[in-house]
Image (cartoon, coloured by chain):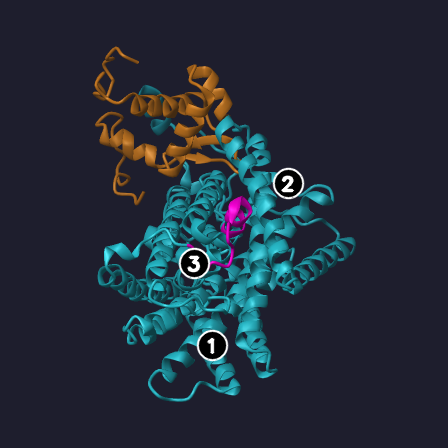
């Protein structure tokens, strides 16, 4: 996560580690698809379990992630759309950017 | 960002989510953190507790009174942290009942029974404190009027005041959550301001050297550890109700973020208030000889003796406002637990209906408020006496609350394990808290029994046993067992790529 790739949104090495870990968690949920559990995310990223659960909870609290009804699986929340649009990549669809988040 | 961009460009389909929330019809996502905090703080009746609790704690713990209160605060913070493990993962209207139900599941016999025991304990606790607060309001209104030269209220007038206030609260609770929340916030805010004035005056008006480390009550020569522990248990009872913001899980904006914070803030705020009140009382009592009653009115005579008689009606007004807010808060919580049970079909389904326009749990309010109003009015008319009635109600409620906390804290590690997120720190906190709560419950009942006040324990046990037996009997006549643990499950429009058309009132 330290090299800048062409589609990187400009996070540099000076960002606090937690923010980068949080984004890594968010990306991992995106990569694995809906229903991925905290344990799976922790294993895939090699992060400690407690850290992963804490980050997942933070992302759920701020509604970037949604907990599925079984309370153990996660899915991306609608707010991710806003995040991607604000980053200036991914493009916007007609009529969608002003959705109330 | 590439996986995120891909997900936004072609969102995956998420199955298993419904189009509407199980808690539809309520004013979802309408309250902010201040309203949630007002709910938790009001349910604690902090002004009344700040005025009466320090004296009781001092009677048990002597010079360790402040330490006792600090110990109780730490325990309440731990309870808040443990309850926060649920609150940050699920927004519910059934509070600890829904939490325990989710932790244990609904299969078998004893699992739903434990969840129902939690729910019934909450119902008993909220109902009894609401009744307690109505009597308290009438009492302090009577004292307030009496300080202007009028006679104290006669029993029928007290009953009438209780009915009038109960009716007002009913109207507010039906008319809208924002309205009742605002009323609660303003009443409790004013009450706390009113309390701050005498406390500040006490500290300013009394010279510094009047703060010695004196055993002001001298009731316990050397309180020792058992005195400190008893004092801590009594202080704990001043915090009950702090968890009630958990019933607003569907109606708070960003509940998973706000409610855990409100739990900790109300615990810490209560602790600060009670420590300051205890210190102020200690200063004040230097100028007054010790009273030989249970000390519950110590502020009044002490202030008259200190030459500040006009503070007494001010404090009465503050206490009355605080009790009014407390009635609203407890009734708000009670109605939502009943609504949850109604929607789960544990209780009759009509209890689960919400008002179409006002979006409040109208049927639950109309079912609960008459009981909450008529019972204390009747007790007063029967000549029971306000002190006696309030003692019984408080004892029953405190026992009920601590039972609910105990069950919820014991179930917390089970919950975390069930969802695959069990880690060391929350497990340790839950374990420690459960042990402390079990000890506190036993110590509380022993303390009350020592003072000849076991009746409230029996009342609680009989009510709980009746409720559980009724549920077991009712189950045999059902076709399907009810599924417990209803909460504000996210809907399709909360996920990326879910429904595009969100109604303004139900936006995620």
Which tag, 2 or 3, sits closer to the chain's start? 3
Q: Residue at x 42, y 81 (%)?
A: B142
How crowded pointer 3 is (Cα within 10 Å; few <14, some 14-19, many 20+) is rated as many
Q: Chain of mark 1?
A: B
Asked whether the beta carbons under mark 2 and mark 1 sit within 8 Å of each other, the answer is no
* Residue marked by disc 3: B54
Q: Chain of mark 3?
A: B
How crowded pointer 2 is (Cα within 10 Å; few <14, some 14-19, many 20+) is rated as some
* Residue marked by disc 2: B105
Kindly report the distance in space between the C-alpha atoms of the residues bearing marks 1 and 3.
32 Å
Q: Which mark is residue B167?
A: 1
For the question of whether residue B30 can be seen, the reply is: no
Q: Which residues are magenta?
A: B215-231
Kindly report the distance in space between the C-alpha atoms of the residues bearing marks 2 and 1.
38 Å
Give the secondary structure at mark 3.
helix
Q: Is residue B33 above or below residue B287?
A: above
- On the same chain, marks 1 and 3? The answer is yes
Which one is in front, B503 or A2?
A2
Residue B503 is inside the magenta segment: no
Chain in orange, by letter, is A
Q: Position of residue B504 (x, y in %)?
A: 35, 53
Residue B220 is inside the magenta segment: yes
Q: Position of residue B506 (x, y in %)?
A: 40, 51
Q: Which mark is residue A101?
A: none
Point out the frontmost of discs 1 and 3. 3
Q: Position of residue A54 (x, y in %)?
A: 41, 29
Chain in cyan, by letter, is B
Q: Is residue B170 above or below residue B285?
A: below
Which one is in front, B317 or B344?
B317
Kindly report the distance in space between the C-alpha atoms of the residues bearing marks 2 and 3.
41 Å
Q: Chain of mark 2?
A: B
Quarter placement of the N terminus of chain B = top left
């Amino acid at each position: 996560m330290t090299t800048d790739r062409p589609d990187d949104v400009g996070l540099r090495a000076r960002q606090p580690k937690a923010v980068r870990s949080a984004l890594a968690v968010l990306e991992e949920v995106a990569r694995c698809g809906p229903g991925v559990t905290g344990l799976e995310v922790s294993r895939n990223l090699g992060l400690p379990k407690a850290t992963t659960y804490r980050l997942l909870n933070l992302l759920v609290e701020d509604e970037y992630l949604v907990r599925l009804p079984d309370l153990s699986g996660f899915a991306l929340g609608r707010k991710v759309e806003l995040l991607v649009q604000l980053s200036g990549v991914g493009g916007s669809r007609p009529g969608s950017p002003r959705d109330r988040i | 960002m590439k996986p995120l961009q891909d997900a936004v460009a072609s969102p995956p389909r998420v199955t298993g989510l419904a189009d509407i929330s199980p808690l539809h019809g309520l004013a979802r996502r309408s309250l902010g953190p201040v309203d949630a905090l007002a709910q938790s703080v009001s349910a604690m009746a902090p002004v009344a507790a700040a005025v009466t609790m320090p004296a009781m704690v001092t009677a048990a713990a002597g010079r360790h009174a402040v330490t006792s209160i600090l110990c109780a605060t730490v325990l309440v913070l731990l309870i808040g942290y443990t309850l926060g493990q649920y609150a940050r993962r699920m927004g519910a209207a059934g509070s600890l009942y829904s939490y325990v139900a989710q932790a244990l599941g609904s299969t078998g016999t004893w699992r739903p029974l434990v969840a129902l025991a939690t729910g019934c304990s909450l119902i008993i606790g909220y109902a009894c404190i609401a009744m307690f607060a109505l009597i308290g309001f009438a009492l302090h209104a009577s004292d307030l009027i009496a300080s202007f030269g009028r006679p104290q209220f006669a029993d029928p007038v007290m009953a009438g005041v209780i009915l009038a206030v109960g009716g007002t609260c009913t109207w507010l609770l039906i008319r809208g959550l924002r309205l009742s929340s605002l009323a609660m916030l303003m009443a409790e805010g004013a009450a706390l301001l009113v309390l701050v004035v005498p406390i500040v005056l006490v500290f300013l008006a009394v010279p510094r050297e009047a703060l010695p480390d004196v055993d002001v009550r001298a009731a316990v020569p050397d309180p020792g550890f058992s005195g400190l522990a008893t004092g801590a248990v009594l202080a704990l009872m001043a915090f009950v109700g702090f968890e009630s913001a958990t019933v607003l899980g569907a109606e708070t904006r960003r509940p998973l973020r706000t409610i855990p914070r409100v739990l900790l803030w109300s615990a810490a705020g209560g602790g600060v208030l009670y420590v300051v009140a205890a210190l102020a009382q200690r200063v004040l009592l230097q100028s007054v000889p010790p009273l030989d009653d249970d000390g519950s009115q110590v502020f009044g005579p002490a202030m008259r003796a200190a030459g500040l008689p006009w503070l007494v009606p001010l404090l009465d007004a503050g206490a009355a406002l605080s009790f009014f807010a407390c009635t609203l808060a407890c009734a708000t919580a009670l109605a939502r637990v009943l609504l949850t049970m109604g929607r789960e079909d544990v209780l009759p389904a009509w209890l689960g209906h919400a008002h179409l326009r006002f979006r409040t749990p109208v049927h639950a309010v109309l079912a609960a408020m008459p009981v909450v109003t008529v019972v204390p009015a009747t007790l007063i008319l029967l000549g029971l006496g306000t002190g006696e009635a309030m003692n019984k109600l408080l004892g029953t409620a405190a026992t009920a609350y601590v039972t609910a906390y105990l069950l919820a804290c014991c179930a917390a590690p089970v919950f975390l394990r069930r969802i695959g997120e069990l880690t060391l720190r929350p497990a340790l906190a839950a374990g420690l808290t459960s042990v402390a709560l079990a000890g506190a419950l036993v110590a509380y009942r022993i303390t009350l029994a020592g003072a000849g006040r076991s009746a409230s324990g029996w009342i609680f046990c009989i009510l709980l046993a009746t409720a559980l037996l009724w549920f077991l009997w009712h189950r045999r006549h059902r076709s399907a067992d009810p599924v417990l643990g209803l909460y504000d499950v996210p809907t399709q429009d909360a996920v990326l790529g879910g429904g595009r058309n969100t109604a303004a009132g139900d936006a995620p």
